[in-house]
Amino acid sequence: MKNRSLRSAMTTNTFLWGWALILPTVIGLLVLNIIPLIATIYQSFHKTGDFGKGNIFIGLKNFQKLFSDDAVLQSIINTIKYTIAQVPFSVIIALILAVMLNKKIRGRSIYRTIYFMPMVVAPAAIAMVWRWLYNSEFGLINNLFNLNVNWISNPSIAVFSIAIIGIWSDIGYNMILFLAGLQEVPKDYYEAADLDGASAVQSFVHITVPMISPILFFVIVTRMIAAMQVFDTIFMVMERSNPALYKTQSLVFLFYQSSFVERDLGYGSTIVVVLLMIIMFITALQMIAQKKWVHYN
Amino acid sequence: MQRRNILSVIVMHGVLIIVALIMIVPFVWMVLTSFKTVGESVQLDPFVFFPSEIRMEAFTRVFTTNNFLNLYKNTLLMIAFRILCAVITASMAGFAFGRLHFRGSDIAFSLVLIQMMIPPQIFIIPQYQMISRMGMTNTIFALVFPGLVTAFGTFLMRQAYKMLPKDLEEAAKLDGLNIGKTFLLILAPLTKSSLIALSVFTAVFAYKDLMWPMIVNPSKDALVLASALAKMKGQYVSNYPELMAASLIACVPMIILYFIFQKQFIEGIATSGGKL
Amino acid sequence: MKKKIVSLCIVAVMTSALVFAGGDAEKAKVAPSKPLSVMIWDSNQEPGIRLIIDDFTAKTGIEADVQVVDWNNYWTLLSAGAQGGSLPDVFWMHSNESQRYMSNDLLLDVTDRIAKSSLIDPKNYPEDIWSLYTYNKKYYAIPKDIDTIALWYNKTLFDEAGVAYPDENWTWDDLYQAAKKLTKADGSVYGFCNVNTNNQAGWYNLIYSNNGYVISEDKKKSGMDHPNTIEAMKWMEKMINENLMPPQNVMSESGEDVLFQSGKVAMTLQGSWMVAAFRDNEYSYANCDIAMLPLNEKTGRRASIYNGLGWAISANTLRADDAWKLVEYFGSEEGQLRQAELGVTMSAYKDTSEKWKNSVPRFNLQAYLDMQDDMVIRPFSRNTVKWENAVLDVMLKVWSKEMPMEAGCKEAARQMNEILAEE
């Protein structure tokens, strides 16, 4: 009897501490993000008037229009293609680099700084460089290797060319997170493995990956979400006149066009709601799957 | 054994150098373009790699038209306060989500995830209206406002707290520490490397954020680096040498800071706080 | 010990944050908002606009602070301001957006002020520009500038090919014949260049010169399927199919201006807003010049699409009188002359652009002024961008040789009519 009330007192205590600690974040998220989200969901059921005035409730009409809109269906395919191409490479390459740079290797601070540079270089410079690299007539890649590939204007490959830019820009971000995670792996684990005669690959698979799996999980989840929201790279590199745009534009790109260029907030909001549902579904799958492979101490 | 080691070091350097070359291209591009003439900067065929001579005109023009001291000051304040807010709120919430089991935590955490799933563009107008109603446009507070809390950081810190060994709390309990003290005295110090990663991210995101500062702080004295650069992009065409010169002046301090900082980030931790 | 220091740091940081969140916010204010706030989107015009404001301040003692926000963010900011209730005091208006702002009472009605003003007389500005900023017979902005279209050509490439420069007798067929001679078989030079998305400076002019139209007077019907429109657009189809222009993907990847500035295309149609860019590029400055658009032989017309911005005042401004004085000054003969003379843009006020002509003596800017004789206002409706984008997307298929021009024009008209029906 006494034991039970002690436990419930502890539960109450934990409850109070827990809520006290998350309160600033929860309030902040509610005010800054969740209220705008609710407004977005509200708009998706309306034919929106100018400047938030004169909205007319139209039920599911926006959704009906969306599901019969070829451009939207195509952009969902584009977004998924991009995600499948971009996320695995940006994660694996970054992980390998992070493991290398975590070793006592000469010049590693220089390497780490260079890998950080794409994160702060001006977007205009990034756009200029890639547009020139990919330019089919005058670009470096085609001229160097004597190719004749329309990297960003061939509808069947442009989305992958965009994914390469995405991989390139994300490697630095992911590497920083992995480096932080690697710090938390105790050195004696490796020493023990070394004594057992384990190879570098073996200790990577059996020690490093399980030990940093919470961070690995975090990187994969956040990168998937970010990849599903790809916008900037497409916006920077492709013009409206590009023949491959239709087979490259993402859902967020379409949302931006609807809401900010064509001023159809209702339809734009509908796209966001659908995007949110897709991402929620994928993330929920990952949250369930993590129980199989993520090791928490 | 020895020879295998040397070989693997060479292979590693080979890989690292190739990746480094790929990563550094846009930076080199910025440097070269900033010295070019306008014509050279867009010349296609033959493409101009190296400027015909080193010209400083773009730099002098950019320096005279922008008040970089003020831009750095506003940017730095924005970054500093955003890091401060991120570190505090994300640590608190990350600890609670990662280590405490209490009712409602799952629902609250789903808010964190949902925030990340929404394209950030939809927050801009509502958040602007809040700032505008508070009469706080063109202030440092306006710049910090969307970064008061961070879903990304909360998720990151939750993972960091989850990685820590389970027996830490037991030991703290034996010492008679309550939850708050356990958090502050025992666990928080062990997440230093994740906190630094969070700070780097917060700094880079804040530095790169363009749309928000542009909209909320358009006044000349309240501009930050990113919005000053965005302003330079013309509606139809841009003067690339000037744009690149300005971008270079903007990003070099960030790179130097990171270079100094990253030693702390990795070597510093491995020898001290990293032990469990 | 170390742990203690770290946790002490965290506590210190927390308290300072509380202080910051509580009291410091007010102090953090960077600038007091005393001068009139003026918002524009083109940083190229900023220095000139500042000089004009300086003159104004010297005269009236009223100060104004210019804020530049790039084109995309400008409209996001304005619509956020419109919903949240705080617009800048004075700002630029564009025909793509003006209808929505006027019909929602966001702009100050200046009709009475114009009537009383000794400086502003509507008949000194092109009537069409007024029409962009008129709603229910009330004026909501003062014309700022106009832009017209002309033909840019590369003298060096013309000399090499032995082709005579374009002159005022040129017809569209002359342009076609010249393009044929200028185009090199190896693809290193193309005679002409007009990417599908360049409508205002490009193929719209063909349509109107041929007495076709893009949108009907009452803004209810598309003119894309009008026989005259289709006939005009067939000229463009000829240019596309005979490869006298670079392939669509090349025009899209590199951009018309860059191709022209790299000597890859010999002719291109460009608006007067591009003059500064071609002046600052030493290749185009040395090798290129401007001529009037060609004449349409059948109709005898030489139409130029034109457009003009307006100076608008927020309906909610607390200082309507001061804001009006500033806008009145920008629109006055003196302000308009100054704008032209500083080379900012062509001015809307009648006969003030002579001074603009001399701002770049090397270029024949007179061509742009001459194009003012037959001007057609840029096609617009309440939601221009929406149908414009739909039309551009159909034209993309024609330019990519996936669809014949006639079918493209009809499809474009169908989609456009659907969108117009919803307006």
Image (cartoon, coloured by chain):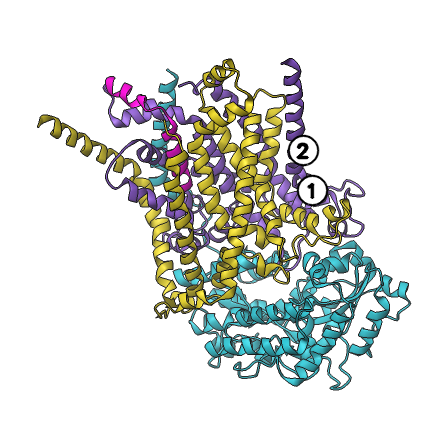
Chain colours: A yellow, B purple, C cyan
What is the count of numbered marks? 2
Q: Is residue B220 magenta?
A: no
Chain that bears disc 1: B
Q: Residue A37, how many percent across, how many down?
A: 37, 55
Q: Is residue C147 visible?
A: no
**Percent coordinates x, y for residue B17 in the rendering:** 67, 30
Q: Residue lying furthest left in this view?
A: A1
Which percent across, then down, holds residue B25? Answer: 67, 39
**Which sits in the foreground, C410 or B176?**
C410
Which residue is found at the position 55% from the left and 22% from the top? A200
Q: Residue at x 22, y 35 (%)?
A: A16
The residue sitting at 57% across, 48% down in the picture is B228
Numbered mark located on residue B29 in the image? 1
Magenta span of residues: B151-174
**What is the distance, in whole Å, between disc 1 and disc 2 at their CAs?**
17 Å
Asked if residue C178 is positioned above or below residue A199 in the image, the reply reads below
Question: What residue is shown at x 47% (from left), y 48% (from top)?
Answer: C31
Q: Which residue is under mark 2?
A: B18
In the depicted view, which residue is nearer to us: A287 or C178?
A287
Queried whether the magenta region covers residue B173, the answer comes back as yes
Q: Earlier in the sequence, mark 1 or mark 2?
A: 2
Q: Which mark is residue C406?
A: none
Above or below for C30 versus A97: below
| Amino acid beneath label 2 | Ile
- Kindly tell me whether residue B237 is visible in this rendering: yes
Question: Which mark's residue is nearer the viewer, 1 or 2?
Answer: 2
Q: Residue B201's x, y, as percent?
A: 49, 37
Disc 2 crowd rating (10 Å Cα; few below 14, some 14-19, many 20+) is few
Asked whether B32 or A171 is in front, the reply is A171
Left or right: C316, with B243 as reference point? left
The amino acid at mark 1 is Trp
